[in-house]
């Protein structure tokens, strides 16, 4: 009997509870629907609005000239120039800087807006292919006519679509203080006694390997700074270092007198000088401050810091790295000790090889904005590269080696690496052209960079790296 | 009153409707249209028909990313829900400091994905460096790193939902089962679980769609290294769109395919779990 009553009560309760449960369930459903809508909205927003990394782009927007800057390291100088220019001429210049590595992304979203960039940058013939609908013919501008070497410009048919504005050079940067210390060692195993005598791969290798053996005496943790292979930090290898073997390969093609043109025409590559690439790459990772399996977490900034703190003697980079070295807290490298060495890879006759000198920065004017804006933009650039004030900015603050004949010989940048580049350019050596302008795409470079990482970590053998690279070139060309 | 509401309904609905149209409907339609075109910027597009879609299914990287995403989703959905349910069970037992634990477990959910990705990259690399390797050495580190990260981020959130569900299970039902001599496991299986089914539906939905659509964490933690072996679908779409010149339309087509897949999977899941829900 009692049981029955209990059961009854339970049932009653149950029904009441059931009602409550239904309510609870309903509210759950409502909240779920809310969450769903919220997620759809969020997904819609984030999925379709291209992420743009502009700093202060949102503000203003009525600027006559809109300059989309490629180089974050000198963004503040451009701001100053813009202010000065406005004070002088009354024309407003809006400067927006894309965060490192996001220029294409930013440009893509900015140029579709009604207030589009009037001046932007393309990275050579390949960049021109992407942006050819947007680039104005600059053939008749003073800017083009004042180029010291007109063949440097990006051209197509009769038209001139990209004007180089800075010449840069890269190679192996070394700290002469550490090198002198090494050459002064009584027990060194090599016969050379100064860096001037290092003019080929064999000598370089002997010196580097002997230095590694004596690294405790020298107080360094490795000869070379870390070979940075983290995602987005690989450009020193997949672009700059890869330039050397491909430069030699395309230089062998006698049908063209320019390695970039030969590269653009090549649908396939043989990677003939791949072993030379391996030579120097092995030297880098085997004599590095970091174990090769750990390189996947290293960034360029890490490498430059190691160099600036005197922990390593050499690092591969270009003259733009001076500010980076100079700004590291606790920097022990003095401006007088910082020197350049060409990247020797063991190619025959490399004693006469110089630094890799060229440019991948070309100014282009947006052909889709109004004619007044185009004229105003050209006027601004001409002012920057030919007026006294503009030139002062270019050489002193931007630190550009500008390829225009409006600059006289003593109007050259004063930082030690830029001076070294000029020094090497005037030496009796042949500079290596920046052939990577002919590399088919970012994708090609990244695939190669990833393969290099796998190789450094010991997950891939060199033969596989070579085929990966060749396949990537072929498939990126074929698309 | 009713009439008044009816009269002003359009007026009140309008702002939301406008916002929804601008930020969702228009981009969505434009996005679908662009997937049939070749373009550099969204304002000048050339119609190419189904070309892009053909390229999508011939793209090995897309298929790899799909497979990786599926594997990741299965593992993370299971582990997140199991962990969250266990935590929820523990924290509805009147242990001392329950509220503090709940708060602490929920907190990771308040941190953005990119930040979490970098934090975990530091942590994992910090551990792996003892073995002279990093996250990029093998795809399996990246995979398990992502799973751990997602568990850490989502477990707390799911736990809160499960707690709400568990608290709604009538005490007398459990008591009755106890009196009838059911074992603890029996109660859990036959009484509690069926009654928290609505929570399970939601949690599965949230974890499934979140794992499948994962982007920030993937980008920050591994960025696809080594050699794109840990690239998930969303990241692959992003790379296609921005990394390969001339492939913008293909990226767009991938995004449309991706949308259809997510919608289908989630719908099927909702139908399946909803049919398991019972009235108490």
Image (cartoon, rainbow, N blue to C red):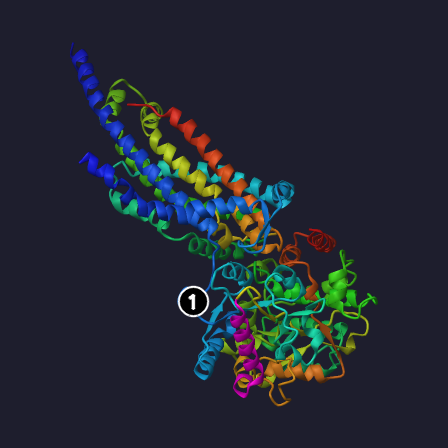
Q: Give the vertical position of A404 relative to A22 (above or below).
A: below
Q: Give the vertical position of B49 relative to A291 (above or below).
A: above
Magenta range: A370-391
- Please identify the residue farthest to the bottom as the structure is shown: A410
Residue A250, visible in the rendered structure: yes
Residue A43, visible in the rendered structure: no
Q: Quadrant of residue A438?
A: bottom right
Q: Chain of mark 1?
A: A
Instruction: Say which of B255 and B280 sits in front.
Output: B255
Residue at image point 65% right, 52% down: A459
Image spot of residue A394 (x, y percent): 55, 81
Bin the neighbour count of mark 1 within 10 Å (Cα to Cα): few under 14, some 14-19, many 20 and up. some
Image spot of residue B124 (x, y percent): 49, 53
How many numbered badges does the structure rendering display?
1
- Please identify the residue farthest to the top as the structure is shown: A1
Q: Give the vertical position of A273 relative to A65 (above or below).
A: above
Q: Give the vertical position of A245 relative to A335 (above or below).
A: above
| Residue A381 on the magenta segment | yes
- Main SS, magenta residues: helix
Instruction: Tell me the residue that label 1 is attached to.
Output: A61
Question: Quadrant location of the C terminus of chain B?
Answer: top left
Helix, strand, or loop for circle 1? loop
| Residue A231 on the magenta segment | no
- Please identify the residue farthest to the front as the structure is shown: A371
Question: Quadrant location of the N terminus of chain B?
Answer: top left
Instruction: Say which of A423 and A69 sits in front.
Output: A69
Q: Tell me if B47 is positioned left or right of A464 in this view.
A: left
Image spot of residue A308 (x, y percent): 54, 76
Image spot of residue A108 (x, y percent): 54, 59
Instruction: Say which of A202 and A259 sits in front.
Output: A259
């Amino acid at each position: 009997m009692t049981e029955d009553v209990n059961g009854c009560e339970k049932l009653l309760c149950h029904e009441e509870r059931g009602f409550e449960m239904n309510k609870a369930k309903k509210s759950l459903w409502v909240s779920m629907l809310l969450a769903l809508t919220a997620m759809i909205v969020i997904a819609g927003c984030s999925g379709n609005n291209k992420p743009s990394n502009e700093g202060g782009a949102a503000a203003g927007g009525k600027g006559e000239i809109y300059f989309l800057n490629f180089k974050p390291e000198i963004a503040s100088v451009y701001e100053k120039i813009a202010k000065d220019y406005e004070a002088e001429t009354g024309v407003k210049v809006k400067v927006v800087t894309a965060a490192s590595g996001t220029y294409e992304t930013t440009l893509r979203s900015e140029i579709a807006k009604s207030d589009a960039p009037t001046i932007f940058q393309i990275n050579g013939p390949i960049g021109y292919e992407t942006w050819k609908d947007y680039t104005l013919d600059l053939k008749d501008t003073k800017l083009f006519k004042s180029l010291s070497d007109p063949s440097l410009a990006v051209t197509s048919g009769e038209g001139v679509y990209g004007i180089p504005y800075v010449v840069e050079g890269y190679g192996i940067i070394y700290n002469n203080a550490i090198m002198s210390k090494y050459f002064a060692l009584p027990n060194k195993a090599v016969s050379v006694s100064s860096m001037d005598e290092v003019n080929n791969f064999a000598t370089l290798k002997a010196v580097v390997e002997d230095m590694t053996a004596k690294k405790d005496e020298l107080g360094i943790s490795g000869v070379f700074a870390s070979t940075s292979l983290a995602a987005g930090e690989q450009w020193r290898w997949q672009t700059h270092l890869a330039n050397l073997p491909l430069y030699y390969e395309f230089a062998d093609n006698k049908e063209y007198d320019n390695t970039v043109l030969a590269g653009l025409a090549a649908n396939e590559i043989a990677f003939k000088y791949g072993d030379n690439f391996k030579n120097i790459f092995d030297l880098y990772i085997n004599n590095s401050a970091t174990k090769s399996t750990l390189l996947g977490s290293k960034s360029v900034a890490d490498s430059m810091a190691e160099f600036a703190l005197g922990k390593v003697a050499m690092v591969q980079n270009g003259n733009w790295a001076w500010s980076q070295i100079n700004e590291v807290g606790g920097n022990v490298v003095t401006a007088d000790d910082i020197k350049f060495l060409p990247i020797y890879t063991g190619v025959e006759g490399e004693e006469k090889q110089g630094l890799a000198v060229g440019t991948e920065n070309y100014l282009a004017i947006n052909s889709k904005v109004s004619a007044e804006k185009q004229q105003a933009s050209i006027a601004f650039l001409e002012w920057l590269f030919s007026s006294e004030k503009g030139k002062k900015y270019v050489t002193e603050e931007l630190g550009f080696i500008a390829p225009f004949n409006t600059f006289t010989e003593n109007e050259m940048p004063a930082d030690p690496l830029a001076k070294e580049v000029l020094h090497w350019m005037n030496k009796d050596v042949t500079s290596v052209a920046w052939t990577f302008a002919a590399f088919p795409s970012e994708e090609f470079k990244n695939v190669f960079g990833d393969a290099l990482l796998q190789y450094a970590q010991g997950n891939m053998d060199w033969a596989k790296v070579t085929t990966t690279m060749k396949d990537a070139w072929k498939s990126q060309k074929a698309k | 009153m009713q009439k008044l509401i009816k009269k002003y309904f359009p007026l009140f609905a309008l702002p939301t409707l406008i916002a929804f149209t601008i930020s969702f409907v228009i981009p969505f339609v434009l996005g679908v249209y662009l997937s049939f075109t070749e373009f550099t910027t969204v304002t000048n597009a050339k119609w190419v028909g189904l070309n892009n879609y053909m390229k999508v299914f011939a793209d090995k990287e897309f298929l790899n990313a799909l497979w990786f995403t599926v594997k990741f989703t299965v593992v993370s959905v299971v582990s997140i829900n199991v962990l969250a349910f266990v935590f929820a069970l523990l924290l509805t037992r009147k242990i001392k400091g329950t509220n503090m634990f709940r708060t602490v477990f929920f907190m990771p959910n308040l941190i953005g994905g990119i930040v979490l990705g970098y934090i975990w990259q530091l942590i994992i690399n910090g551990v792996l460096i003892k073995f002279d390797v990093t996250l990029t050495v093998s795809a399996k580190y990246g995979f398990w790193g992502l799973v751990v990260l997602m568990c850490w981020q989502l477990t707390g959130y799911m736990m809160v939902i499960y707690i709400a569900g568990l608290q709604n299970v009538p005490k007398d039902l459990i008591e009755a089962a106890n009196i009838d001599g059911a074992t603890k496991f029996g109660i859990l299986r036959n009484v509690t679980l069926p009654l928290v089914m609505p929570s399970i539906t939601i949690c599965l939905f949230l974890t499934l769609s979140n794992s499948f659509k994962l982007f920030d964490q993937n980008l920050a933690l591994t960025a696809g290294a080594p050699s794109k072996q840990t690239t998930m679908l969303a990241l692959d779409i992003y790379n296609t769109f921005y990394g390969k010149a001339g492939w913008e339309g293909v990226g767009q087509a991938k995004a449309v395919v991706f949308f259809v897949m997510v919608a289908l999977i989630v719908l099927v899941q909702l139908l399946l779990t909803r049919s398991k829900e019972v009235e108490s």
